[in-house]
Amino acid sequence: MKEIFAYIDQNLNRFIDELFVLLRQPSISARWEGVTECSRLLTGIMEKIGIKPRILPMGGERNPPLIYGEILNPEAKRTLLIYGHFDVQPPEPLEAWNSPPFQPTIRDGRIYGRGSADNKGQFFAHFKAIESVLKVNGKLPINVKFLLDPEEEVGSPSLNGFCRENKSIFAADMALNSDGPMDTSGRPRLSFGNRGVLYVEVNAQGANTDLHSGNFGGPIPNPAWRLVEFLSTLRKPDGTVAIEGFYDNIVPPTPQEKEMMAKIPFDEKNFKEKYGLKKFAPPDGVSYMEKLMFRPTLNIAGFTSGYGGQGSKTVLPCKAMLKMDMRLVVNQTPEDIYEKYVRHMKKHGFDDLEVKMLNTYAPSRTSVDYPLAPKFAEAIRQGFQKDPVLIPAGGGSFPGAAIRNILNIPILSVPYGNADENNHAPNENFAIDCFKGGIRTTAALFFQLAG
């Protein structure tokens, strides 16, 4: 590993220059801008390293270009599947960026640009780890496959079906995802799962146009009040969700998972001060970590109606729109929870509301007793020179269930992004030290898994 790490040190500036080429190419899946062009750029990059790529169109109207890659060693005993995504969030608001989002730049030891940490920079670290091992060792000690998703930022709508139809292509012994930030303590994380998500939109309609609230207020129904009345049925006074069957079959943390959560660095007093909080949301008696990892949520993500500008406008709005996301835990499925959500709506007399399912991810969990997990932890120690924080399940969502539940491959997450990477926000950034530590970690992991 000493020679491989030396190669990484010697070539780090070139690695960054090559990453910049990828970051300059927009790939915004929300408006399908540059995604196909980015897939072609990526396959060329992979070929130069020695990874054999294929663009696999996933069908449908957009026919999104999933990128599969492989580099195989006939003598290897294990195969690692690496998940990543090459689509990015829209960069708006542009005026909030200190430098143009698709013109990557370095400031204070960080790479600034859209996709720098989410997720181009993180999977690019895997590419450079492969190059470093090949240059020094001549071959990889394990087989490596890539699944690079073109639709992660819009919910990966094509991925589950494509994985069901192409299981043999992605066959592997274990899988790795590097996405998101490391711990706020500065230590890397090793996560065994993630919550799922169900995102819905609810629309209420009143009159066919906005009206004067004095001349028409009273007899004309206000759709905003209709959504407020609906919202009032969704939550009990103790903060729990009132949808019948919402908590059916959820699994509480095991003693081992509770012990793992207790070791996660967390300063409650400083956390509350940082975010201006006096207390956490109900229900009481459940710890912050358990709420984040083992409890489902019902969140109001947006509520739009009427006038929200400066000053006053006496308007009776004709439309109101509600957006909600539900974070789901193991044994919940987006389809079942959506059905219960709609059933609740009808039971309480809100049949007039229009509801749409916008995107979903199923929850995913690999056992904390997974026998290869210590090898991942040791690779992190070698790469970052720090002990990892062990996380039973991350609070966010990504398509890990496609790999864990459909492809039947245990998957662990090792985020390489700095804790303040600003993913999905202006001035997204990736610390160069984290990029380097990620390359080192992936290279070390190849040899750990070979043993």
Image: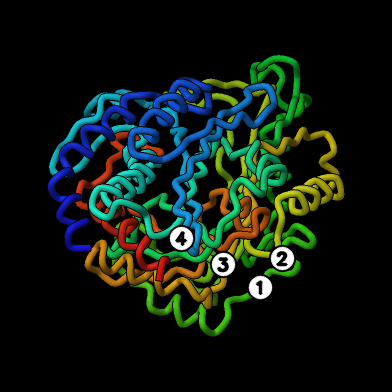
The residue carrying mark 2 is 247
**Tag 3 secondary structure:** loop
Nearer to us: label 4 or label 3: 4
**Tag 1 secondary structure:** loop
- Residue type of the residue flagged with mark 4: Ala
Nearer to us: label 1 or label 2: 1
Query: Would you say 151 lies left or right of 210 here?
Result: left
The residue carrying mark 3 is 366
- Residue type of the residue flagged with mark 2: Tyr
Q: Position of residue 189 (x, y in %)?
A: 37, 64
Q: Position of residue 354 (x, y in %)?
A: 77, 33
Q: Along the polypeptide, which appears first: circle 4 or circle 3?
A: 4
- Residue type of the residue flagged with mark 1: Val
The residue carrying mark 1 is 251
Residue 301 sits in quarter: top right
- Residue type of the residue flagged with mark 3: Thr
The residue carrying mark 4 is 76
Visible in this render: residue 268?
A: no
